[in-house]
Amino acid sequence: LLLMLAPAVIIIFIFAYLPMGGMVLAFKQYNYRDGIWGSPWVTGIFDNFRFFFMSGKAFAVTANTFLYNLCFIAVNTFLAVLFAVILSEARGKKFKKVTQSSIFLPYFVSWVIVGTIAYNLLNYENGDVNGVLKTLGMEPINLYADGPAWRVLIVLFNAWKSVGYSMVVYMAAVTGVDTQLHESAQIDGANIFQRIHYVTLPAIRPTIITMVLLDVSKIFRGNLDLFYQLIGKNGALYDSTDVIDTFVFRSLLETSDIGMAAAAGFYQSILCFVTIMVVNGIIRKINSDYA
């Protein structure tokens, strides 16, 4: 068993633990000639962090990153559990297979394709949504200049693409619930909603908590593919949609300052670490078995 586990451990060590040494770049004036370890240290220990915090947008992009991920966790978890429970209770095998495949399929669609779909649906000149509005005699809407609207649209697109994967995990957990519990509940007169409330949901609670904890550990990391492919370089939407990752990515393209980008990544890692420790500590106080 240990030998079978070895490849996964080696891969995680190479691609997840060894790169942690690169965090030293947050405190160096990196140049390609000297490399990571040979590049000189910055004069002041927080010089690379100064650009991010003196930009005037550090708090705004940090808040956006946190709030978007909070919405993603809440919406995606609710929908994934809902669909998993509904499909587990459905009787028609064909219906279950078609529905499950339809929900899961968007997970495999590239964010580049999703961005193209979004543009063809929502652009002002000839988007399908505005085409329908014009047909109904209504004024077209310039959504690509409407920041608040994209706060909702981004959450919806993320849910459409991501819920299917989580749903499969929850369906596996629902399938593992002892059927004798459901049979006992039915004998006691419980209807389908009561069985879901008193049997299914309590049984999959550990899975829900584990999945949420995994998502919370990335709550200060924005999905660069999602935000960059949907929004691109549209300055009109930055205030409503800019997250740490997109801000740093654009700054890196403009300045080529790798030390600054590493400092922002280090800042995100610290925030994520503190968040997951706090949340896990709260769960441990409530129920140590789920921590």
Image (tube, rainbow, N blue to C red):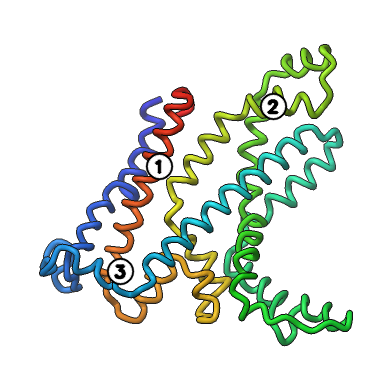
Residue 39 visible, this orientation:
no
Q: Residue 194, percent across and down?
A: 78, 25
Above-or-below relation of 3 to 140: above
Q: Residue 76, percent across and down?
A: 62, 49
Residue 53 marker: 3
Q: Residue 159, percent across and down?
A: 64, 55
Name the N-terminal-most of marks 2 and 1: 2
Residue at (50, 81) in percent of width and height: 235
Mark 3: amino acid: Phe
Q: Nearer the viewer, mark 2 or mark 1?
A: 1
Q: Quadrant of the C terminus?
A: top left
Above-or-below relation of 256 to 217: below
Secondary element type, mark 2: helix
Name the residue carrying label 2. Answer: 200
Mark 1: amino acid: Ile
Name the residue carrying label 1. Answer: 276
Q: Alpha-carbon distance for marks 3 and 2?
A: 47 Å
Name the N-terminal-most of marks 3 and 1: 3
Q: Alpha-carbon distance for marks 2 and 1?
A: 27 Å
Q: Residue 216, percent across and down?
A: 47, 45
Is 259 displayed left or right of 106 in the figure? left
Q: Nearer the viewer, residue 1 or 52?
A: 52
Mark 2: amino acid: Thr
